[in-house]
Image (tube, rainbow, N blue to C red):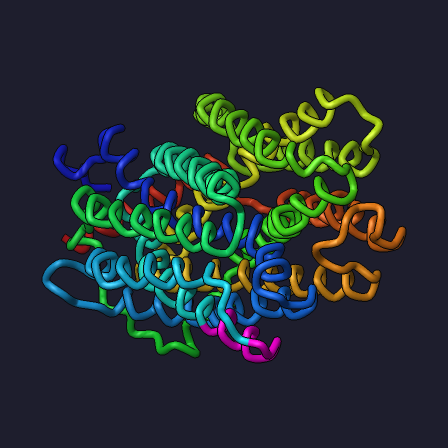
């Protein structure tokens, strides 16, 4: 492999700035996952099923546009690059439509309110696709070796966690202003500014490698078939989807879990804040361990630990001491950190394998379908969650004692045991993943030899 010029290597400072892109995206995803479902019921006036349907529709649209956006960025030939110009195109609408999501639209008809929230969320998703898919497709290009990808993705994961922390902070900020509809609009408007500004810095520190840009002769349908025929990509995508389904379910249910199952809604924000602090603290430790271990082994270890903690989440109730209820999610954070970070580091290795087999570099298509499958899985899980809650008799806005016993059991199970099963299935697929450190090193040597032969 040809050496990368010094000016083309990302310093730690540049990695931190680049990671702000994932920070903004995860802020939006976390706000929707943790807060929006409850917001739609209490301030948007939607039933649990319609609230879940809003999220499902937007994520399905988002999912289907991801592969197209990835393919578009693969084929773009602008002077400024294939990926980076899209950061400037999508940043402003990304923030603007996010602010509009949190407006309690003054419409009497529930159907009309549903149409408004679904439409605005779709617009947010499209803007996010415009920036996030090219952003993620740059990672295997900027970080070209096995360990450097893990390092860059560690920075991204830390920034993403801080994005989740910022999303959690939206609730206390809105509560401090009265917690009414106007407070949520103001909070969202302030948040929108922060969603827009970092993308100009991300654009400034990122780079592309012209020598690695290639024409991609495969058509879109042929590209899909090629991805489907790539066994290691199928395994990686499946384990990632299963892990993300667990994240999406827990995220959507956690506030309801604290409000109704535990009866301590006021503990939601500090518990999640502590969880995120532990995630950030554990990521550098995992990064150090990753320098001598295979990514697959680390994913299995972290996910197994996380799944075991889910049992305690199911068993917990209001009679448990508060410190234990703070400790349980904190223990889960250690496993979550690696399960969230590692698949993205592994994706770059799969893309290298594809380049060796096909002679083409198709980061955009691989990332696009990776996020497509993840969003389809997560969105369907959240929709099913809303349907189960509605069948159980859950009614948003009621006090804990007024919920049915079936509704309370559903909340507890959807927050703990169902995600645990999804995590265990992810481990089963990870065991079959064959791209070890040694295998990837051979791929890198073969690619370097080919590039030397091609001049």
Q: Would residue 452 be seen by someone viewing this image from the given angle?
A: no
Compared with 304, 38 (above or below) is below
Q: Position of residue 10 (x, y in %)?
A: 23, 35
Q: Residue, x 81% and y 52% (percent of image)?
A: 410
Q: Is residue 113 magenta?
A: yes
* Residue furthest front in the image: 178
Q: Position of residue 210 (x, y in %)?
A: 15, 54
Q: Residue, x 34% and y 43% (percent of image)?
A: 444
60 or 108, nearer to the observer: 108
Q: Please count the marks in the image.
A: 0
Quadrant of the rendered image containing residue 52: bottom right
Q: Position of residue 280 (x, y in %)?
A: 47, 28
* Residue furthest right in the image: 405
Q: Is residue 372 magenta?
A: no
125 or 215, nearer to the observer: 125
Q: Residue, x 10% and y 62% (percent of image)?
A: 79
Q: Quadrant of the N terminus?
A: top left
Q: Residue, x 17% and y 67% (percent of image)?
A: 77
Left or right: 87 with respect to 146? Answer: left
Q: Would residue 135 be seen by someone viewing this image from the given angle?
A: yes
Q: Position of residue 222 (x, y in %)?
A: 42, 76
Most common SS among magenta residues = helix
Compared with 323, 275 (above or below) is below
Quadrant of the rendered image containing residue 143: top left
Q: Which residues are magenta?
A: 108-119
Compared with 22, 230 (above or below) is below
Left or right: 23 with respect to 329? Answer: left
């Amino acid at each position: 492999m040809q050496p990368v010029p010094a000016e083309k290597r990302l310093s730690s400072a540049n990695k931190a700035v680049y990671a702000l892109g994932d920070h903004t995206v995860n802020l939006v995803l976390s706000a929707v996952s943790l807060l929006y479902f409850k917001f739609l019921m209490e301030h948007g006036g939607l039933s649990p099923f319609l609230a879940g349907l809003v999220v499902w529709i937007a994520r399905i649209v988002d999912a289907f546009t991801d592969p197209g956006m990835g393919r578009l960025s693969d084929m773009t030939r602008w002077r400024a690059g294939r990926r980076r110009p899209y950061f400037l195109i999508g940043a402003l609408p990304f923030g603007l439509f996010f602010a509009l999501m949190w407006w309690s639209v003054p419409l009497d008809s529930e159907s009309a309110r549903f149409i408004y929230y679904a439409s605005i969320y779709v617009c947010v998703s499209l803007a996010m696709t415009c920036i996030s898919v090219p952003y993620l497709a740059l990672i295997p290009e900027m970080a070209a070796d096995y360990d450097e990808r893990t390092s860059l993705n560690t920075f991204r994961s830390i920034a993403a966690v801080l994005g989740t922390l910022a999303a959690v902070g939206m609730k206390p900020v809105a509560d401090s202003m009265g917690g009414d509809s106007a407070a949520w609009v103001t909070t969202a408007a302030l948040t929108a500014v922060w969603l827009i500004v970092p993308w100009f810095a991300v654009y400034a520190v990122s780079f592309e490698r012209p020598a690695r840009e290639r024409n991609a002769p495969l058509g879109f349908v042929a590209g899909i078939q090629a991805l489907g025929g790539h066994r290691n990509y199928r395994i990686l995508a499946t384990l990632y989807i299963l892990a993300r389904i667990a994240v999406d379910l827990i995220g959507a249910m956690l506030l309801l879990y604290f409000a109704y199952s535990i009866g301590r809604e006021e503990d939601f924000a500090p518990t999640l804040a502590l969880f995120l602090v532990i995630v950030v603290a554990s990521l550098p430790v995992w990064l150090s361990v990753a320098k001598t271990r295979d990514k697959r082994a680390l994913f299995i270890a972290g996910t197994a630990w996380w799944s075991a903690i889910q049992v305690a989440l199911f068993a917990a109730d209001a009679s448990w001491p508060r410190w234990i209820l703070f400790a349980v999610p904190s223990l889960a954070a250690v496993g979550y950190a690696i399960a969230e970070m590692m698949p993205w580091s592994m994706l770059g290795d799969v893309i290298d394998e594809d380049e060796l087999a096909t002679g083409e570099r198709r980061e955009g298509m691989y990332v696009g379908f990776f996020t497509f499958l993840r969003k389809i899985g997560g969105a369907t899980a959240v929709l099913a969650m809303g349907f189960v809650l509605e069948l159980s008799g859950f009614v948003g806005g009621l006090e804990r004692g007024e919920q049915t016993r079936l509704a309370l059991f559903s909340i507890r199970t959807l927050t703990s045991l169902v995600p645990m099963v999804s995590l265990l299935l992810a481990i089963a697929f990870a065991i079959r993943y064959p791209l070890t450190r040694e295998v990837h090193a051979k791929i890198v040597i073969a690619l370097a030899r080919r590039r030397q032969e091609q001049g």
